[in-house]
Image (cartoon, rainbow, N blue to C red):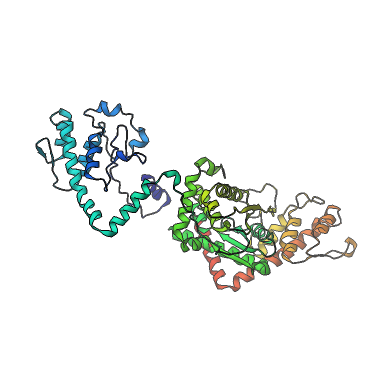
Amino acid sequence: NMLAREFCDSAGIKLKPIILSHHMLYGLAQGQVKMSKSNKDSAIFMEDSAAEVARKLAQAYCPRSADGGAASGGGGAEEESMHLVQDDLKNPCLDYVKHIVFAPPGATFSAGGTCFRDYRAVHDAFVSGALSEADLKAGLTEAVNALVQPVREHFATNERAATILATITGWMAEPKELRASPLRRLQALPDGHGPAWAVFAPPPSLSPTAGAALDLLRCLRAAPDGWTRVLWLSDWSALSLNCVSGGKTTADDLKAICAAQDLLVGCLRALDPQLMAGVVVRRQSEAILSDPSNYWISVINAGRAHSLGAIRAADENSEQVGFVIATLMAVADALALGAAAGTGRVLCCSSPRDARSLELAVAYLEGCAAYKAAGLSPPEVRVVEGVSLALKADAAAADADAELLLLDGQPDVQRKMKKAFCEPGNTAFCPPLAVARELVLGCGASLEVKRREEDGGDRAFGKADGGQLASEFAAGALHPGDLKPAVRDAAWGTLSRVRAAVAADKALAAAEKEVAKAAKKNKKK
C-alpha cells in the first residue's frame, strides 16, 4: 500500500491514495495468522448459531505465554505484515476480546465474576493466571453471541434475508468438484456474427512510422474474402504499459493514447480507403464499458489460471507490472473477440510479442472447461510478417532519420531518402527498394524513374512490377542515383495523401495537435 504513495511522489502525482488498514483477526486454531478458507472452525461467522459459537470458542487455541504462540509455527514475515502491531502471544481469544468486544466506545467485558473496562486488564489477568481459560472463553462466548443475536433475528424474521441466507448456505454446502462456474466474458461481436478476422493494432506511438501502418494494412489484407475485418485498438492496455506518458493526470495520457490511435486509423484510411471502408474499428475501452463486470471477471479468471512465470514468458525482458496486466487483458480480449460457435475466428498481429500473448490466450481457452461447455471453439492466431522500412543499417534508436514517419513533411522525406543506404546491386538490404515496393507500389501508386536516353531512358513501374524493379537494380540496369530520387518523389506522393487527409478532417487535425502536445511534454521529462 505504501508503494502506491511512493509511486505518486516519483511520478509527480499530487493526489495520493489514502490508505485505511484494519486489523486481521487470528484464526481460532493454533498457528493461524488469519482465518482459513478451508476450515470453517477457524473463525466466527455472522450466521453461526449460539451453539456453534460456543463450540468454536471452547476448542480455540488460547496460550498464556509467548513461547506457546511461537511453538505454533507462525506465518513468517509475509504473514506477520498482515498485522499492524507486534504481538508475540498470538492468542485468538484475546484478539477477539480486544478487536471485537472492546471495539465500541465504552464497552466492558465480564468474565470470571469480574467486569473489565479495558483490554489491557483482561490481558494481564489472563497471563498472570488470575483469569482462567474456561472463564475467558465463557465470557467471550456470551459477548460474541450478544453481538451476533440481532443478526440471527434479522435472518429469521426477514423473508428476503432468509432466502438469501438459505441460498448462500446451500451453495457453500455443495461439493467443490460439482460446482461449475459459468463462462464470463465480454462479447465484442454479437451472437450469430459470421467469421471474423481480428487484427490487434500495435501499441500507440507519438511518432507513427509508415512501416507500422503498412504492417497493419498487410494484416487486414490477409483476411479471406467474406470475413469481417476487425481492427482492435487496445487503449487501456496501452495505458497500463505506459506507452504514452507525460500528462499531468492519467486522463491526459489516455487522451493522448486515443488521439494517437485515431490518427493512425485516419492514416490507414488515406493509404487504402477501399480496404478500410470494410473494416470495423473497435476501441478496447468502449467495448469494456459496454459490459465491464464480465470483462474484468474474465481478466481475473485468466490471472487465476496462470502463474506469474507463464505470463512473463510472453516477454521475459519486461519487468513492469503493467505488462502483466496488459497480458491478462489480451487473454480477455481474445475471449471477447475470438469466442465463437460453428464459425471461424482468427486473431492476427504482426508483432511476435503480441503473438505470444495471443497464443497464451488460445492455450488458456483450449483448457478452459467453461469455454468448452459453452460450445465455443478456440480462435486461431496468425502472425503476418512485417517488412522493415529502416533506411539505415544498425541505426541508433534516437536517429530521427532512421525511418519514414506517416506525418513527415516533404523536407523530411527528401532528407531521409538522401541519407538512405543504397549500394549498387545490393538487394539484400536496399531501403529505397523496400520503400518503393511497400509504400509506393503497395499503396497503388506508380514509380517513375527519370533517366537520360543514354542511361536507358525513363522507366515506369506499376503495382505488379516490384519483382522486376528488384531484378533491374540487382543487374545494374537501375543505378542508385536514379532509384533514390524516384523513390523520394513517389514516397512523398503517398505521404502527401496522408497529410492532406489529416488536414481536411477536423477530428484528425485535432488528434494531430494532441499527439504533438504529448510529444512535446515527453521531451521535457
Q: Quadrant of residue 276?
A: bottom right
| Residue 145 percent across, percent down from the top left | 19, 45
For the view shown, which residue lies furthest in the right direction? 454
Q: Nearer the viewer, residue 135 or 394?
A: 135
Looking at the picture, how far across and down is residue 5, in whole percent?
37, 48
Vertical side of 271 occupied by 31: above or below: above
> Residue 167 appears at what percent x and percent y?
34, 53
Of residues 5 and 349, which is closer to you in this image?
A: 349
Question: At x 17% / y 47%, what residue is drawn?
Answer: 146
Q: Is residue 453 above or below residue 17?
A: below
Q: Residue at x 79, y 51 (%)?
A: 427
Q: Nearer the viewer, residue 381 or 284?
A: 381
Q: How many marks?
A: 0
Q: Is residue 108 among what the camera can see?
A: yes
Could one spot residue 205 in this view of the protein?
no
Q: Is residue 49 left or right of residue 501?
A: left
Work out whether 110 lies above or below 485: above
Instruction: Please state which of residues 443 and 29 is positioned toward the viewer in this rendering.
Output: 29
Q: x, y percentage for residue 31?
A: 32, 32
- Residue 340, image quadrant: bottom right
Which residue: 71% across, 63% down? Answer: 491
At 25% from the left and 28% from the top, the residue drawn is 66
